[in-house]
Image (cartoon, rainbow, N blue to C red):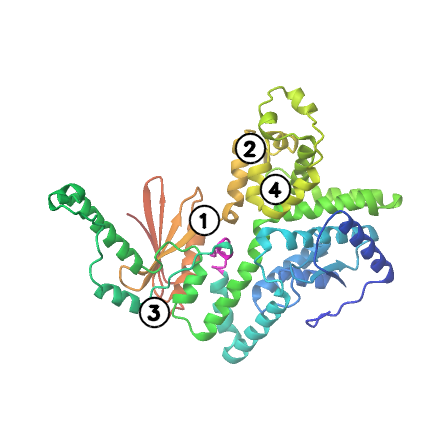
Amino acid sequence: MAYGFDSSELTPELKAVRDEIEGYARGYGLDFFDTIFEMIDHDQMNAFAAYGGFPVRYPHWRFGMDFDQLSKGYEYGLQKIYEMVINTNPSYAYLMRSNSMVEQKTVMAHVYGHVDFFKNNYWFSKTNRKMLDTMANHAVRIRGMMDRMGQEKVEDFIDRVLALENLIDPYAPFSPTTRVDNRTGAQEAAENAPEPEVGRLKVDRGYMERFINPPEFLEEQRKKAAENAKKELRNPPEPMKDVLLFLLENAPLQTWESDVLAMLRDEAYYFAPQVQTKIMNEGWASYWHSKIMTTKALKASEVIDFCDSHAGTMVSQPGRINPYKIGIELFRDIEDRWDRGAFGKEYDEVEDVEAKYRWNKKLGKGREKIFEVRKVCNDVTFIDQYMTPDFCERQKLYNYGFNRRTNQYEIIDRDFKKVKEKLLFSLTNRGQPFIYVTDGNYQNKGELLLWHKHMGMDLDVKWTKETMRAMAAIWKRPVSLETENESQKKVYSFVPTADGIGDGDFSEKFV
């Protein structure tokens, strides 16, 4: 294998199994990139997992911390990573040498499901399919910077960027709009430009002027024109969700800092679809490994071992969402409903529970439908469009709360709308606050103003402070953040020390 990691080729037996599983997967209609399987041991698997699935990443303490955590979990028997697959073309997948043959079969079938999803799901369509090479290139470039300027200096800057890596706009790659970059020259030109024409209507007869163009109308138009002119001078003109891009274009960065920020931003966008489709992706891969194994690949002597392994993956706990379980069951539910025709206006208007249970128009469109869903949805639209009250009840999806008196999780709400709302809330924007840049010259002092769009997600003051500290270190000027909840507006501010190294001054005030 490339990138300096030793690996052994698949044994003849595993090659035969791989070809067999691939044939079954293609026979079911899965369409995937060429997939290269590599055998590695548990230390390599933990190292790759710490690197986000890649063999090589830039040096940083976070990867070492993640590796240590994964290694201890494996040694203590708390967790085991059976497989790992990378969204590239060709795709690379890793098999644990210690896996049994049943596990290797299952993993291969699971991997083909993932790669089919990577290739065909819309939300992955803008990702870099050569990211393996890109990651290795990033590692080489950052190591070179560390050699020239010192590891600590470069790593400190990486720390700041990683504190902000979630402040991107996952929908930006799909937007055709082009941003206008406001610079000083544009501002000076606008200030010297003549007053904009008001929307006066043409009048042929003078006595009709005051009726067609009343003074109050003209004054309203002048105000609108002035507001628009002021808005165009603002940088950015509209609230901007891709905070990293704004910093990249406007922060006073050295060349090497711009390079690091650009590289880490690219990596953040590469990983974004994986977060947006976690339930669907794992559900789709689990659906196909289950289908292939139970209908094609299993020998009679392997059934019990497969069931034991599969059940362990699908186990759910109160208060936690298992993406494998929710995903596979929802795909199965969609397939069953579209096979029976249990959807649409006619079905929804039936009130008899027994009639709905027996409903079967034998449409046989289930397989076609799940492939369609796999192509267009992300987790939010998947849950929003296809989760039903019956599905929630069957899967025992309730809202749970921790009872300190009994020291147990207990059901606190069974209402479908509330359960679905809470699940969607946890998935929207990856369960994180909506943060936008609104002004790069706040109070005309060169300070940065952010805006928290309150969508039901409150700010955690501790994390707010750390995020603003990292932001101020990159912006090298004070940073403020506006937030409003229940008509109460609050402004958080962080003023960095003069040298940018100390703690800085964090404050909050109501306005």
Alpha-carbon distance for marks 1 and 4? 20 Å
| Nearest-to-viewer mark from 4 and 2 | 4
Across and down, in percent, residue 309 comes to 77, 46
User: Which tag, 3 or 1, sits closer to the chain's start?
Assistant: 1
Identity, as a three-letter code, of the amino acid under mark 3: Ala
* Quadrant location of the N terminus in the rendered image: bottom right
Q: Is residue 404 visible?
A: no
User: Which tag, 4 or 2, sits closer to the chain's start?
Assistant: 4
User: Which tag, 3 or 2, sits closer to the chain's start?
Assistant: 2
Return the mark for residue 498: 3
| Nearest-to-viewer mark from 2 and 1 | 1
What secondary structure is marked by label 3? loop
Q: Nearer the viewer, residue 9 or 31?
A: 31
Instruction: Give the main secondary structure, helix, strand or loop, of the magenta stretch.
Output: loop
What residue span does the magenta drawing correspond to?
A: 163-173
Across and down, in percent, residue 346 comes to 60, 25
Residue at image x 40%, y 60%? 179
Alpha-carbon distance for marks 2 and 1? 32 Å
Mark 1 sits on what residue? 433
What secondary structure is marked by label 1? loop
- Horizontal side, residue 90 vs residue 507: left or right: right
Identity, as a three-letter code, of the amino acid under mark 2: Arg
Alpha-carbon distance for marks 4 and 2? 24 Å
Return the mark for residue 405: 2
